[in-house]
Amino acid sequence: TEHTNNMTDCDSSTMSPTSSYDDPTVVTVTPDDKGVKNPEPNDVLCGRGGSINSHPGNERYRTLVEKRKRVYLTARFKREKRLIASSIVSEIRVLNGRFLSRDTKSGLWKDIGDEKARDKTSQALRENAPSIRAEIEEEINEQRAEMYKEESQKQYQQPSYYSSWYPPYYGYG
């Protein structure tokens, strides 16, 4: 059985690229009431199930999320996190991809718009956060241990210039 998220209905037919600050990579989409029957390969499908997970757009989307997950989880400010999520949405949109949810009444796929797409992306970036943060902490601790080990070894090694520091002996007295 396939479960779909009931999100605000929207459609890609109103997806007209609007440049923000004359940046051709920024595409803005707002929800609308029309729908599409067949999702395209670059679309990201909201919901659950094997057919949704194996959709090419969802596979690409998950790859983008995984690439940016560590940066997202180590970001200090909410604005940074929002920009990371928005960059993933923009990357999908530039490829003419849509974030689609199936309308249970009509059976059509409708675009959820940028705001909900960003929310969905933020949620995906937070998945498995505790275990990933633990991995990051473990890596940092290993790096610290290696650094301390190198520093302690340097302290016990006498530099070679100490052996030649003494003044030359000329044989007087």
Image (cartoon, grey):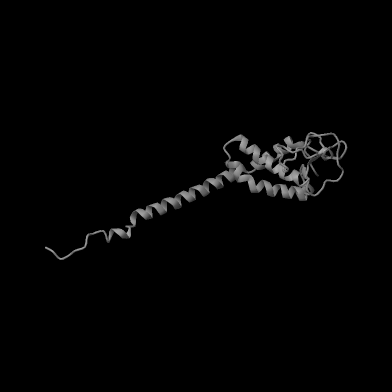
| Left or right of 89 in this view: 129 | left
| Left or right of 168 in this view: 18 | right
Residue at 13% in and 64% down: 172
Find residue 27 and report its horizontal and vertical position in percent: 75, 40
Q: Quadrant of the N terminus?
A: top right
Q: Please, is residue 148 above or below residue 121 in the view?
A: below
Q: Quadrant of the C terminus?
A: bottom left
Q: Please, is residue 11 above or below residue 163 in the view?
A: above
Residue furthest to the left in view is 173
All told, the count of numbered labels is 0
The image quadrant that residue 6 belongs to is top right
Q: Closest to the observer: 77 or 24?
A: 24
Find residue 92 and report its horizontal and vertical position in percent: 74, 45
The image quadrant that residue 153 belongs to is bottom left
Q: Closest to the observer: 93 or 76?
A: 93
Residue furthest to the front in view is 22
Residue at 84% in and 39% down: 13
Residue at 87% in and 43% down: 37
Find residue 42 and report its horizontal and vertical position in percent: 78, 48
Residue at 45% in and 50% down: 145
Find residue 171 and report its horizontal and vertical position in percent: 15, 66
